[in-house]
Amino acid sequence: MGIELGAVLTAAATVLVAVAAAIGSITTGWLERRHRKRAIAAALLAEVSALSAIIRRRKYREDLDEASEHVRLTGDCYQLTVPVPAHYCRVYAANLTAIGLLDPDQASKLVEFYQLVDSVVQDVSPGGVLASGSDSPADFTDAKDLLNDALAIAELLKQ
């Protein structure tokens, strides 16, 4: 009977150690994922904040208004080119595969923000509708509206 009790205690201890190891591993994984999620969110929000500040400080929306008004008054074709480096959204690009870790609403807003900004970047980059030249005031107004929408999302993300 002593041998049987010893075997039972050994088996029970083995099971307890295995359960404790599993709980430790699960907890560690959960904590690491939580930390990664927070770090990614903080980095993306910082980039959104910086891009928003640049849009405001460089008065891109006002430039689009002026271009639209010029075209409306003159009927001329107007070119608006803004040199935007390919790495303007490097944090977003580096973490694109991890966006799913974030809260669904936050992830959705981040993707929408970057898509809106990227649309305007494409328009003012070589080959884009505004960089190539447009005689439609609506083209410039549409780009301004996209920036306004992006800035509104950036404000929501700050909250």
Image: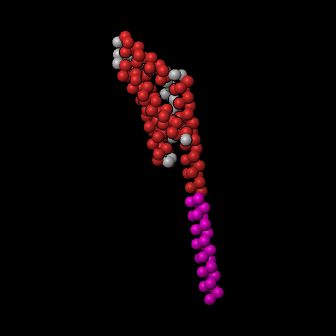
Q: Nearer the viewer, residue 2 or 46?
A: 46
Part of the protein shown in magenta: 1-27
Q: As displayed, is residue 103 above or below residue 13?
A: above
Q: Quadrant of residue 71?
A: top left
x, y (%) of residue 133? Answer: 38, 16
For the point 56% across and 55% down, which residue is it?
30
Q: Nearer the viewer, residue 14 or 76?
A: 76
* Quadrant placement of the C terminus: top right
Q: As displayed, is residue 123 above or below residue 16?
A: above
Tell me if residue 54 can be seen: yes
Residue 16 on the magenta segment: yes
For the point 60% across and 80% down, which residue is it?
8
Residue 61 on the magenta segment: no
Looking at the image, which residue sits at the far bottom? Answer: 1
Decide whether the magenta segment is chiefly helix, strand or loop.
helix
Image mark count: 0
Judging from the image, the colouring scheme is secondary structure
Q: Quadrant of residue 1?
A: bottom right
Tell me if residue 127 can be seen: no
Q: As displayed, is residue 25 above or below residue 90?
A: below
For the point 41% across and 16% down, which residue is it?
69
For the point 37% across and 22% down, which residue is it?
139
x, y (%) of residue 111? Answer: 45, 39
x, y (%) of residue 44? Answer: 54, 38
x, y (%) of residue 153? Answer: 48, 36
